[in-house]
Amino acid sequence: MHYVGKELNEECAVFGIWGHENAAKLTYYGLHSMQHRGQEGAGIAVSDGKHIYDHKGLGLVNDVFDHDKLEELSIGHAAIGHVRYSTQGGNSYANVQPLVFRSQKDSLSIAHNGNLVNAHKLKGELEERGSIFQTTSDTEVIAHLIKRDYAENFIESVKHALSVIKGAYALAMLTEHQLIAALDPNGLRPLSLGKLGDAWVVASETCAFDLIGATFVRDINPGEILVIDNEGLHSDFFTNRTEPAICSMEYIYFSRPDSNIQGINIHAARKNLGRMLAQEAPVEADVVTGVPDSSISAAIGYAETTGIPYELGMIKNRYVGRTFIQPSQELREQGVKMKLSAVRAIVEGKRVVMVDDSIVRGTTSRRIVGMLRDAGATEVHVRISSPPITHPCFYGIDTSTTSELIASTHSVEDIRKLIGADSLVYLSVEGMQKAIGRNPAMKNCGQCMACFTGKYPTEIYPDTVLPHEKELLV
């Protein structure tokens, strides 16, 4: 079976601010701080109390917005923004968010992080009732549901729409008169509330608050809807059937090390994952190194616990983006060498522990092991700071089929041979939960474990799963 050399990618990040004269520029900086969550498109929508104006485009935040574009948007006191990695819906301009919907009565802009598992079903029902869709994004379904059930009380319409959609959604929505933030009943994606002077801020990651000088107030709760307007902030819940299940990969891989999720710092959690991995899988070696960037914290934790020196055994080229990787196999091989280099002076003649956060398809791990051997490493022991990813994700990560996941069809020993390592050990599920340190009284410590166990926190609809893979769902 051929495994494409591709990293895990998360769908996007959202940002929103209400009550600040520099709303658009602060949104730009907030999106820039969360660029790691999506590099395929970016957009900002602003409100001046009478109209919504927006600009979006394909590419990085810096590519989409220049000084003149930001000046054009500097007319509003409220804004929402979005950076995108496409999973549901293709990578086209029409799917770049925030999406803006205009009507005679008012306008609505939506930025969505996550993935709806019943979007296909709902879209079919809406089309039968006359809805016409302009994008292939599941986010557009939310707007149609809100407008279909539009009542005199707009917020009640929003709450009803949120009770119908299923899956992962952290939302920032903007009208001429309100900023609305909402989180799905499982809280599968992170969403936080902050304050900047008299202005309210919401963001997917707390690192955005740090960049703009905002103060973290609290995490938004599963099933919660926040309405922010000129009267202040109002909190309500659109459902009382909540069960926290935040994506485990937020702690392991996606979030920035300087972000905090529900009181837990990401860097500290990753160091603990490395410490636990060292307890579960020690090995005699000369140096420990981490695959840049998301695995460095875990590698430091592994080194501290084992007493083996941590060294910078690999260097990442900061000036090569994901778009460099081309589809041909030959260029993929060259692409990995362009993005990562082994430091020969560090690894030559040494037994190396290579710590990584995950193995998805296997090809990248094989190339990195080969790179370390080519640089003179005498042994390469691979340690993974998460359990094997054996099941697809339907909540916004681009692993929606088991054919993309090497651990779903191969044993650990088979994977070890395929990647060419002297040994390979994954962190246990129990070790991962303990290391991250969430509340043990909650089911699965309040984490989504679906990619490791196949037990999904929501119903998975038949049209979400490829026909030949339905038997793999527990």
Image (cartoon, helix red, strand yellow):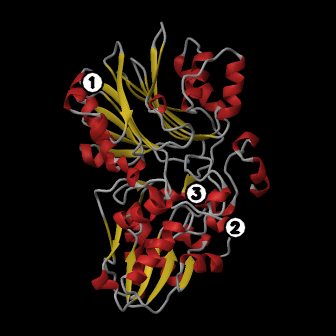
Q: In this view, does 398 lie above or below 273?
A: above
Q: Mark 3 points at which residue?
A: 447
User: Which of disc 1 and disc 3 is earlier in sequence?
Assistant: 1
C-alpha span from label 3 to label 1: 38 Å
Residue placed most toward the observer, 168 or 99: 99
Q: Quadrant of residue 202?
A: top left
Q: Do the residues labelled 2 and 3 touch (CB within 8 Å)?
A: no
- Residue under the image location 47 percent in, 34 percent down: 92
The disc label shown at residue 73, or none: 1
Query: Is residue 444 shown left or right of residue 327?
Result: right
> Residue 358 in the image: x percent, y percent?
52, 67
The mark lying in front, picked from 2 and 1, is 2
Which mark's residue is nearer the viewer, 3 or 1? 1
Q: Which of marks 2 and 3 is nearer the N terminus?
A: 2
State the residue position of label 2.
409
Other-residue count near label 2 (Cα within 10 Å), few / some / many at <14 / 14–19 / ≥20: some
> What is the spatial separation of the Cα atoms under label 2 and label 1, in whole angstroms?
50 Å
